[in-house]
Image (cartoon, rainbow, N blue to C red):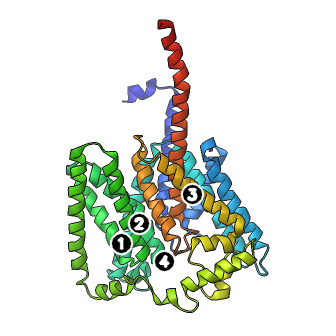
Amino acid sequence: MSAIAHELPPQAINAKLISLIASAAIGVGILLSGFVISEPAPYEIYMAGLIAVWALFGLRISRAILPLLVLLVAMNIGGMIAMTQMADLANTPLYLAVSLFLALSAVFFASVTSVQPSLYRLIFIAYVVSAVATSLLGIAGYFHAFPGAEMFTKYDRAAGAFQDPNVFGPFLVLPGTYLLYLLLTGPVSRMPLLAVPLLIITAGIFFSFSRGAWGMFAVSAVLLTACLFLQSASGRFRLRVVVMTIAAVALLVIAFLIILQLPGVSDMFTQRAQLEQSYDSARLGRFARYTIGFQLAMEHPLGIGPLVFGTIYGEDTHDIWLKALMDYGWLGFVSFLTLTLWTIGAGFRILLRDRPWQPYLLCAYVAYLGNIGLGTFIDIDHWRHLYLLLGLVWGAIALEYRHQRELRLARPASALAISPAR
C-alpha cells in the first residue's frame, strides 16, 4: 500500500486529503444539527465558519441552483424591507441574520452535493447518528432516566437537545424515512442493524407528542412505500414491500399498545391526539389569528416586521404563509411560494429516475413535502433541517441538470462517430 502511495503524484495525494477533510467537516456540521438547546447553537457558529471557508476556497454554485439562491435572497430582502416598518428593532437584525444564514446553508448543501454526489451518503449517515443521539436524550428525559434528564423535555414531552418538542419531532422524520427505505430495499441480513436505530427514532417521534411529527412520519412512510412500489417493475420486490409494510404496521400497533400501558403515556396521548386543542379555536386562538393576519397583510404589503405579530396578539402566527406575509412582506411571501412550488415541481419531475442519488432525493423529497404541509399549522421559518432538505433536493435537481446536459453533448459526438461508417 505504501509503495502505491509513493507512486501517486503529490497533487493527487493532496487532493484526496482535502476531499477527506472537507467530507469530515460536513459530517461534523450535520452531527451538530441535532443539538439546538440554545441560540446561537453550535450548528450556526460552525456552519457559518464552514460556509465562509468554503466560499473562499472554491464554492461553486451551478446555474441550476441559481433560482434557489435568488428566491431565498429575495425573501430575506423582503424581511429587511419589513424591518423598516418597525418602531423598535429589538432582536430583529439577529433574527434576519439567522434567516440569511439558513438560506445560505441551503445553497451550500445544494452546491456541495451537486459537485460531489457521494456526500449524500455521508450526510444521511451523520443525520441518522445525530437523530439517534438526540432521540435517546429525549427518551431519557421523558422517563427521568438520570438526574437532570428533565432538561431534555418540555411541557412533559420529549424535546431531546432541542428547545421545542414540535421541532424535535419533525427533525427526526428524514432519518426515520431513510432507515425505512434501507429496510425495504436492503438485504434481510441488515434488518436487525437497521431496526434498532429506527425504533429509537420512532420512539423519539412518539414521545415528542407532536401531532405534526406523527402526521409527517406517517405521510412520509406512505409516500415512500408508494414510490418504491410504483418505481419497481419486479413482482417479487413489490410483494416484499407489501409484506414488510404489513409486518411493520403490525409491529408498530403492538408496540403502541404496550407503550400506552406506561404510566402517564395514555393520558398525554389522549390529550395530544385531539385534532383541535384549546389554543386552536379560542377567541384569539391559532385559527382566529389566521383571519386577522391575512386581513392585516392587505393593509401592510411591506409587512409589519419579524416577530411583531406575536407582540400584538400574544402568540406568533403558527403558519408559514402568514409568517411570510407578516415578517417578509408580499415580496417575501411571493418568493417563498415560488420557491416551494418550484421545488415540488422540479423534484417530482426527476423523483423516480434511476440515478445513484435517487434514494436520497426520494427520502428528502417526501420529508420536504411533510414539512411544507406542516408549515400550514406551525411556524417552520427557522427550522434548520428544512433548509438542509431544500439543499438536498436542489442538489439532486442540479445533478440531473448536469446529467441531461452531458447526454445532449454526447449525442453529436456519437453521431459524428457513426457517420463515417456509413
The answer to whether residue 60 shows anywhere in this view is no
- Say the numbered circle drawn on residue 381: none
Q: Quadrant of residue 292?
A: bottom right
Question: Picture coordinates of residue 354 (x, y %)?
Answer: 39, 40
- Placement of 242 over or under 201, stated as above or below: above
Contact between marks 3 and 2 (CB within 8 A): the answer is: no
* Residue indicated by mark 3: 341
Q: Is residue 49 left or right of residue 162?
A: right
The foreground one among 225 and 107 is 225
Percent x, y for residue 259? 25, 79
The residue beneath circle 4 is: 164
Q: Earlier in the sequence, mark 4 or mark 2?
A: 4
> Which residue lies at the image location 40% right of the left edge and 64% below the top edge?
173
| Mark sitting earlier along the chain (3/2) | 2
The residue singled out by tag 2 in the image is: 172
Tell me which corner region of the image, top left, top right, bottom left or bottom right, holds residue 315: bottom right
Q: Are marks 1 and 3 in contact (CB under 8 Å)?
A: no
In 3D space, how far apart are the residues under numbered discs 4 and 2 (Cα atoms)? 13 Å
Q: Position of residue 3 (x, y in %)?
A: 39, 25
* Spatial separation of the CA atoms under disc 1 and disc 2: 8 Å
Residue 186 in picture, x, y percent from top left: 27, 49
Q: Residues within 10 Å of mark 4 (few under 14, many from 20)?
A: many
Helix, strand or loop status at disc 3: helix
